[in-house]
Amino acid sequence: MEKFFAEHHNIFYETVMASSSIDALTRQMLTSGVGAFRQNTVFLNIDGRSSTEVHEMTMEILKAKYGLILATRPHDINNTSNYTDIYWLSDEGGLTVLAGYIIAKTMKKKIRIITVAYTGNGDTVEESVFRTKKLCEKFRIDCEVVGMELSEKKKKPSAFSTAYWENITHKSAYDHAFTRFLLFSDMIREFSSSSCLVISTLFVPTDDMDAQIYCDILRLIANIPPAFCFVRGNGENVLSWKA
């Protein structure tokens, strides 16, 4: 992904003197750009970074009201696929869709927007698909909308995701509090393993979730062959719509 954009765009670099990655990030957010041309979204490749570093950077960026894109395995784009899959999970201003739309159009790929109905909250696939189609029409996004059901009562995590979770967390059995994440991981692996790349709305960690568990969940969700991006907007609308 980095090589692709480097070959097709003019990219500007800034050097920041700092004592750590967190310090560098803070300095860059405070000093980069001029006036209205300041950046509003931070892109991070999380491969090779410690859980503490990823967690602290994520919290600092979200607290500063910046948009955030976390990428893993950015070089593993599957160019043989015709689809970019976007898992649009919450209203965070639309950055998830915008980032996916820009990447897909630049790479000349079709877009599939996957909307997930969490039946534990009383949602249905039909209602979720209807809402998403109306939003895509409003924002003039040409895509295929796919509805998926996530139900902890109807389905159990696969043996694959359970074993992977237990391996990365070094626990003999998974905590059922994380069932939703294991089911979401299964959903992505079953539907999107052959996609060009996958983009998903990034969930915000709870106050009591430590850095290691948070990053383990990200690794679980992104455990598929193609490149994966987690995206979180700052709540401000980034999509224009037709009247």
Image (tube, rainbow, N blue to C red):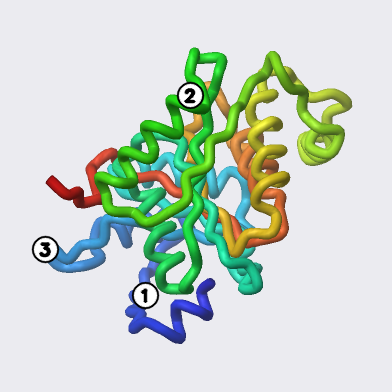
- Residue at x 25%, y 65% (from the top left corner): 32
Secondary structure of the residue carrying tag 1 is: loop
Query: What residue sits right under mark 2 in the picture?
Result: 207
**Would residue 48 appear left or right of 88 to someone viewing this image?**
right
Q: How far across and how far down the image is residue 77, in percent?
A: 61, 69
Q: CA distance from mark 1 to mark 3?
A: 19 Å
- Residue at x 64%, y 34% (from the top left corner): 184
Tag on residue 146? none
- Residue at x 35%, y 35% (from the top left corner): 91
Q: Are marks 1 and 2 in contact (CB under 8 Å)?
A: no
Of the image marks 2 and 3, the number of the one nearer the N terminus: 3
Nearer the observer, 203 or 24? 203
User: Do we see residue 229 in this rendering?
Assistant: yes
| Label 1 neighbour load within 10 Å: few <14, some 14-19, many 20+ | few
Tag on residue 35? 3
Q: Type of residue at label 2? A: Asp
